[in-house]
Amino acid sequence: MKTLIPATAALMAAVLLSGCSKPKALPEAGYPVNPVPFTHVKVTDSFWGQRLDASRQVTIPLAFSKCEETARYDNFVKAAEQMHADHNLGFEVGGFSFDDTDVYKTIEGASYVLQTAPDPALEAYIDSVLEIVAAAQEPDGYLYTARTMNPEHPHPWAGETRWSQEEVLSHELYNLGHMVEGAVAHWQATGKRTFLDIAIRYADCVLREVGPEDGQACVVPGHQIAEMALAKLYLATGDRHYLDEAKFFLDYRGKTTIKDAYSQSHMPVLEQDEAVGHAVRASYMYSGMADVAALTGDASYVEAIDRIWENIVTKKLYITGGIGATSQGEAFGANYELPNATSYCETCAAIGNVYINHRMFLLHGQGKYYDVLERTLYNGLISGVSLDGGAFFYPNPLESDGSHERQPWFGCACCPSNISRFIPSVPGYVYATKGNSLYVNLYMSNTVTTKVGGRDISLSQKTYYPWSGQVILTVDETELKGPMALKLRIPGWAQGEVTPGGLYSFADGLDGGFRLTVNGKDVDAAVEDGYVTVKRRWRKGDSVCLQLHMQPRLVVADERVEADRGRMAVQKGPIVYCAEWADNDGFSVREATLDPSTPITTDHDPDKLGGIDELSTAARIGDGQVPLRLIPYYAWNNRGKGEMIVWMKCD
């Protein structure tokens, strides 16, 4: 049994988004910037409050119920029965080789919920599930029901022996990754070692059997995530071997038998400079590279992901923050290949895009990474789940002929279970600290208590963002003895920039800008690295008001994006808009031509689609003009099937 080292609110939070006390034996290396754990942030926001409530009350219970209905739990039960049988019981192995991970991911999300909303019944339910999981673990720690339930005839993707098909389809190490992620979250939430010990035993099995030494299987994950997870397990236990294994997985990629762009194994990772292949695998790998770079101090990994990030943001990013242009391989396309009706933009890939950009910020402390993170979060990520939390998109296209419809579950259920684990962690993306500086990265109403320079400060944030650009921050309590630098992010859209690097740009000639006051007095502060900084000795009652000038804007794409030539999109603040059938009766929104000379007006409707700003303008159909209404992209397909479009033809 491993001896656990208490987690650190500085180093560990950078990867885990949660907080505990300082470890005794971790290296100096780590992320330069540290996020404030989500457990320290109490959201009072109506926009995000709705989503957090829906996740807790609907999404997570639904995911657990689907694990019951779709035999996810039965797989563990059958594996345990087979292990104790003296002959092959002949269980048929169906589904996917990674179905176990839906259980692990849902436990992870539920564990985050337990940290902010204790629920004895939920905790007891998870305990009952973990009894089933533990019983399916083989004596040496291996836990992969797709093989164990029928060793003679395992899942077709599993291969005849352990790890033999890992780089292709078995997902054995992918299962390990999600197991560790869920296990660490459960340990932090409950203090119980049950799940963590299961994960440690499987990780130790991997350490023994997978690696570069004689007698080991020299393979790397076919579907990445184990890299991130093993870095996290290292932080939880202090056992350097887990971090070394994560680095082995990265160092040997492109050097083993399988060399394929689909799984980013076409060349060594340090030589890569373009995002290619399966977008979820890629985003998880880039996130793992950041973790390993931060924890080992290996700058070569940072240089590689800097190059890849630049390629994504300037050539392969959708205006919604989605990534992955093609359904063939759920993959990145060529540079500037960004089709709309056939765009894939998998929900899991949007979550991966948030992971990448969060880590890039933690490495570099620049607001441009949060510009991409925010765009993804408010558009291409939350579009993946219905407003009530009970139906999901797998792909998130930017145009629909009416054939798309959210589903309550999928045979390949990675997206619903991923949403289950992601949404409860959102408050952990709001704030970060470095030395005597406090970063305010996202704007949502909340209260927070954190340490800056080793001393406590409590703040309240009040805003109606994303519908209003006004944000008020008030110091509630402070133990600070000296000055603190409060760094408020000024989004690119408020500075005349749609996305870093110019893949998209504003086309209307309107002004953005912002106004900043402290205790009612104007402050003339320059923007540096995406932030304005107010440094002073803070006292209880001090108030900062940031007013971001927010209005509807017209957006065009780089001419090299063929799908968007002669078209415009509409954005207000961080929200990308679309035209949907339900608001535009009598004509096809896909055939409408936007008139850029017609003003766009805003009306807030508190009852429509959970409360939205609806935009109104005019469009041309044939020789006639029709009124055109636009809703936030994330809210489409909540009123049934029908046409939708983001990039509209324009005169």
Image (spheres, rainbow, N blue to C red):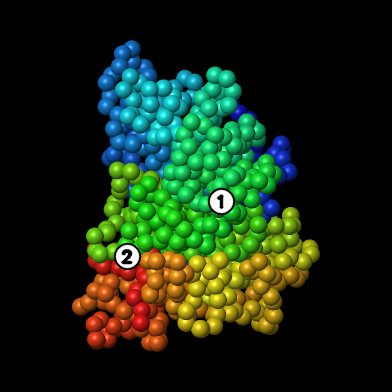
Q: Position of residue 532 (x, y in %)?
A: 66, 71
Does any portion of residue 100 appear in the rendered image?
A: no
In the picture as drawn, the residue positioned furthest to the left comes out as: 586
- The correct choice, above or below, for 611 with respect to 258 in the image is below
Going 73% across and 57% down the picture, which residue do you hit? Answer: 435
Q: As drawn, is 524 to the left or to the right of 337?
A: right
From the image, tell me which residue sits under label 1: 273
Q: Nearer the viewer, residue 365 or 132?
A: 365
**Quadrant that contains the C terminus:** bottom left
Viewer-side label of 2, 1? 1
Q: As drawn, is 152 to the left or to the right of 434?
A: left
Q: Quadrant of residue 97?
A: top left
Q: CA distance from mark 2 to mark 1?
A: 30 Å
Q: Position of residue 534 (x, y in %)?
A: 71, 72
Q: Position of residue 444 (x, y in %)?
A: 52, 67
From the image, tell me which residue sits under label 2: 399
Going 35% across and 74% down the picture, which residue do you hit? Answer: 648
- The correct choice, above or below, for 616 with respect to 134 in the image is below
Q: Of the residues under marks 2 and 1, which one precedes in the sequence?
A: 1
